[in-house]
Amino acid sequence: MTGSILLVDDNAETLKGLSLRLSETLNDEAKIVEWQPTEGDGDMSAALNDRIGADTVLVVTDYDLTTTVKGLFGLTIVSWCQKVFVPVGDFSRGNLTALPKEPNLFEMRIPTDHTAAAYIANAFRGFRDIRALIGRNRPLLTEGASLAGVLAEVLERPYLESQFAAYMSRLGAANSFLLQKLREFAGPAEPDDDEKIQILSYVLGHVLLNAILKYPGPILSLNGIAAYIATVPAEAGAIEEVFGTARYRGPFSALGPLYWRDDVDNILDELGKNTGNQTFDGFGDFNRHVVSGKIGRELQPHLCNRCDGLKGGYWCPFTSRPVCEREDCSVAASSWIPQGAQLSRVEREFYDEWAPILGM
């Protein structure tokens, strides 16, 4: 057992059921701690503090805890966890619209359906593994490596530091407690290695889960790689056949399948050596052509009335559709998408509709 998960819910039956399903999913990998807050717990902050220890890897809380403690909401739990740099995920069981579907950078949105236990288990393993990887690379803590440099080293892709760094340009705006802690580090109180590992794993784990793996760039999700070769995720079998050696197997890889873009590009370059003098409108067209040639049939087209689903290259995380570089198809909106997400663009129609309203 290498860590614990704290589950918080005001419904005893729901709490016990989730705990049981999670125990079955993780076997003996984690200790599951249950907490049903009551007025008898006294000060809620102190009660939560008593239940979180050095081995706590993850906290999961319901949004509405008011049936047992008047005025207590999961947002309070989330805020406290963010203050002490413990990863936290929340869900809304009773009112599904109480929480937006998209979490903040330093937060996770837990599904309420049958996939909840698997999602929590993946989040636990991901944060546990990234903490362990940093712990095994302790020289990085004293060598003055940047956040992106640490992530690149522990993922064994040091040459991707600059790409990872582009995802981290707005960290301070996402968690004010982080800025405060970094200011303390700059003062006379030098943090010890364990404190550095906790904060690094907290920050880098969230950046990896909620930014790098979500917005295609150096790592491609199934949606991302399907868009990259101008097809649909239903072609997962063909994608794995061609790009199986490019699979990403680091922290949170159970979200997969996930693929390293540089390895994908190497495979595409090798497949494209026999295209001769043939020209293509864009890299999405080239990628689709060479993969179709490799599998001996045309890849399925995606849904697009501009190109009949035959172009692509980029993924729009807002409309959840492949897009290409054509001006009438997509726009590179750096204020909407992390700068490191080189293969993410905003679909033009969506952008034109919402940019004026959002003042962007």
Image (tube, helix red, strand yellow):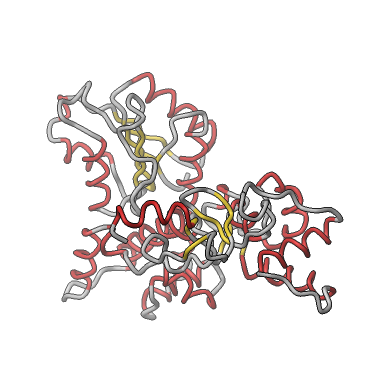
Q: Residue at x 73, y 53 (%)?
A: 240
Q: Residue furthest left?
A: 43
Q: Residue at x 54, y 35 (%)?
A: 25
The quarter of the picture where the C terminus appears is: bottom left
Residue nearest the observer in this picture, 10 or 189: 10
Residue nearest the observer in this picture, 187 or 266: 266
Mark count:
0
Q: Is residue 197 above or below residue 19?
A: below
Percent x, y for residue 23?
49, 32
Q: Residue furthest top?
A: 13
- The reply, left or right, for residue 211 in relation to residue 255 is left
Q: Is residue 47 above or below residue 201?
A: above
Residue nearest the observer in this picture, 239 or 11: 239
Percent x, y for residue 136?
48, 66
- The reply, left or right, for residue 178 in relation to residue 128 is left
Percent x, y for residue 263?
67, 68
Percent x, y for residue 343?
54, 64
Q: Residue at x 21, y 40 (%)?
A: 76
- The reply, left or right, for residue 39 in relation to residue 332 is left
Q: Residue at x 32, y 56 (%)?
A: 356
Residue nearest the observer in this picture, 3 or 312: 312
- The reply, left or right, for residue 148 in relation to residue 275 is left
Q: Is residue 102 above or below residue 163?
A: above
The quadrant where residue 239 appears = bottom right
The quadrant where residue 139 appears = bottom left
